[in-house]
Image (cartoon, rainbow, N blue to C red):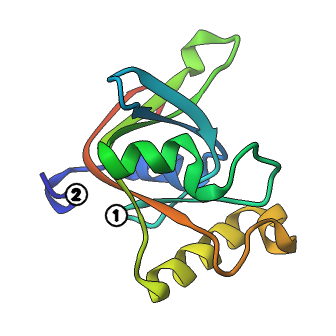
Amino acid sequence: MALESISISDEVRAKLETARVARLATVDFDGAPHIVPICFVFDGSVFYSGIDRKPKRVSPDRLARVRHTSKRPQVALLIDEYDDDWTRLWYVLVRGNGELVADPSERRRAVMELRAKYPQYATGMLDDEAAILRITPQQITSWGKI
């Protein structure tokens, strides 16, 4: 199902555009789930996450999220907010496909959008040539105080 056929309310769209962190779930080579927190930007149709300059134990191309999506592109992205007042809880669950952005102009646009959202990226934490993961939604589900 293409995103164009998915109905997203203005309230959900606002949460997706302003939320600061998400959890990206991938499936490893043995079929086990793997989840990591990510910074992301939603451009109205797809999500982008950069492989930034925070310390990592392996090179960007060896990161689990990159390797997993190259073999099994199915991913889930959870954007949520917890509050001790449980009437304020909400989440948005995105199911879709993840892949590295190959097109240089799309990558540049994603880097610019990520830098606009995160001041740390604008001050050098995200290289011009950074690897960018695109998540193309197939289903978006929301719950709670949206």
Element under label 2?
helix
Q: Three-letter amino acid code at disc 2?
A: Leu
Q: Is residue 10 visible?
A: yes
| Residue for point 64% across, 79% down | 129
Residue type for callout 1: Ser
Residue wearing tag 1: 45
Q: Secondary structure at mark 1?
A: loop
Q: Is residue 37 left or right of residue 48?
A: right
- Would residue 9 be visible to someone looking at this image? no
Q: Which residue appears farthest toward the bottom when viewing the image?
A: 105
How many numbered marks, from 0 up? Answer: 2
Residue 118 in the image: above or below residue 74: below
Residue at image x 68%, y 81%? 128
Task: Name the residue: 36% across, 31% down.
Answer: 29
Mark 1–mark 2 distance (CA, rounded to whole Å): 6 Å
For the residues labelled 1 and 2, say whether their Cβ atoms are less than 8 Å apart. yes
Q: Which residue is mark 2?
A: 3
Q: Position of residue 87 (x, y in %)?
A: 56, 14
Could you say which is closer to the camera, residue 66 or residue 45? Answer: 66
**84 with respect to 103 (left or right):** right
Q: Position of residue 73 (x, y in %)?
A: 30, 47
Vertical placement of 81 versus 100: above or below?
Answer: above
Q: Position of residue 52 (x, y in %)?
A: 71, 60
Dividing the picture into quarters, in which one does residue 101 lie?
bottom left
